[in-house]
Amino acid sequence: MRRRDLLAAAGVSLLSVSGRAAAADPFDVFRWERRLLVVFAPIRTDPRLAAQRMRHRDDATGFAERDLTVIEVVRHSVLVDGRPTPTLRAAELRSRYGISNADFATVLIGKDGGEKMRRDGLMPIDTLFETIDAMLMWRREMGRQ
């Protein structure tokens, strides 16, 4: 499924009949399709956010191979692969993962929706890739290719 399709599906699946956000997992739309690296930053100009973005850009191929989508939660906004999304709410994500507005943290979410790794700071790309590469699901995916 392409990113645009995932985002469109997110807009549909997270809204209830009344138009309010449903109580379901905000990342359900990505489940079984994408792994998520959720980056929480207090402000857009945080140098750690810039450094984490640079790490993503430097190994975009590795992110694509591992079906890894980057979600940035910065102040009150949420970006999915650099694009704003109204379907995910910053306050809800911060509450869910216990990360305050002043904290910088990175969280890896597996395709099953479970938290796989967390760092109170920058996520080293080699550590991120090693963690994903050790997952049973990743090994199965690689066996199919």
Image (spheres, rainbow, N blue to C red):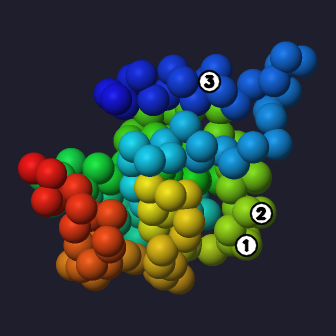
Closer to the camera, 10 or 124? Answer: 10
At numbered mark 3, what does the secondary structure look like: helix, strand or loop? Answer: helix
Q: Does 133 appear above or below 17?
A: below
Closer to the camera, 108 or 84? Answer: 108
The amino acid type, in three-letter code, at marker 2 is Ser
25 displayed left or right of 20: left
26 displayed left or right of 125: right
At numbered mark 2, what does the secondary structure look like: helix, strand or loop? Answer: helix
Q: Earlier along the polypeptide chain: callout 3 or callout 1? A: 3
According to the picture, the residue beneath numbered tag 2 turns out to be 95
Q: Is residue 77 visible?
A: no
At numbered mark 1, what does the secondary structure look like: helix, strand or loop? Answer: loop
Residue drawn 66% across the image and 45% down it: 26
According to the picture, the residue beneath numbered tag 1 turns out to be 98
Q: Does 39 appear above or below 70?
A: below
Q: Does 144 appear above or below 95?
A: above
Label 3 and label 1: CA atoms lie apart by 24 Å
Count of picture labels: 3
Locate residue 88: give its quadrant.
Answer: top right
The amino acid type, in three-letter code, at marker 3 is Gly
Locate residue 132: give its quadrant.
Answer: bottom left
| Quadrant into which the N terminus falls | top left
The amino acid type, in three-letter code, at marker 1 is Gly
According to the picture, the residue beneath numbered tag 3 turns out to be 11
Closer to the camera, 129 or 52? Answer: 129
Residue drawn 45% across the image and 67% down it: 108
Label 2 and label 3: CA atoms lie apart by 21 Å
In x, y percent, where is residue 69?
37, 49
Whether the residues at callouts 1 and 2 have beta carbons within 8 Å, the answer is yes
In x, y percent, where is residue 58?
15, 59
82 displayed left or right of 20: left
Q: Residues within 10 Å of mark 2 (few under 14, many from 20)?
A: few
